[in-house]
Image (cartoon, rainbow, N blue to C red):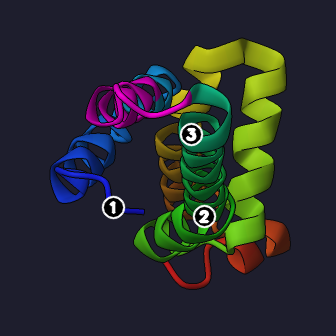
Amino acid sequence: MDIRDAVAVALICAFLNIVPYLGPIIGWVLMLLVIVSNNLGADFSTGLLPLLFIATCGYAIAQIFDNFISQPVIFGHSVRSHPLEIFIVILTAGFVFGIPGMILAVPTYTAIKVIAKEFLSEYKIVKRLTHNL
């Protein structure tokens, strides 16, 4: 796309992605500002707008891949749970407790699984859910 400093902007967006919810939005706005500042003399409708649209689509695809594929798989391997299980836990916590619930969902779920394995290991459902802990 012939954007100067694309690697630097990508690294900044990657680091901002660590911040929940606002980080990706700030990274996206920063990316658009860099594109606009690199193309100040370009015609808006024929030069700048298509470039902004393509960059936004690429960023959206990367965010969708990260949020729906790579994060559940990584969380699943780190806490030894199925990615769908992690996804359901995060969605449920988000519906019930909002943004703080989504942030605390995986650590809380993992703590509950460990406590259940230690103290309720005689139940079949607990054995099944904690067999690989």
Nearer to me, 16 or 90? 16
Residue 38 part of the magenta segment: yes
Mark 1 — residue? 2
Q: Residues within 10 Å of mark 3 (few under 14, many from 20)?
A: some
Q: Which x, y percent locates residue 128?
A: 75, 79
Residue 90 appears left or right of 15: right
Residue 87 picture quarter: bottom right
Residue 81 appears left or right of 93: left
Label 1 vs 2, first from the N-terminus: 1
Q: Which residues are magenta?
A: 29-43
Q: Is residue 111 above or below residue 29?
A: below
Q: Amino acid at mark 1?
A: Asp
Q: Residue at x 41, y 22 (%)?
A: 26
Mark 3 — residue? 52
**Can you tell which of label 1 and label 2 is closer to the viewer?**
1
Distance Cα–Cα, label 3 vs label 2: 29 Å
Q: Which mark is residue 28?
A: none
SS type, badge 2:
helix
Q: Residue at x 47, y 70 (%)?
A: 74
Q: Is residue 15 above or below residue 79?
A: above
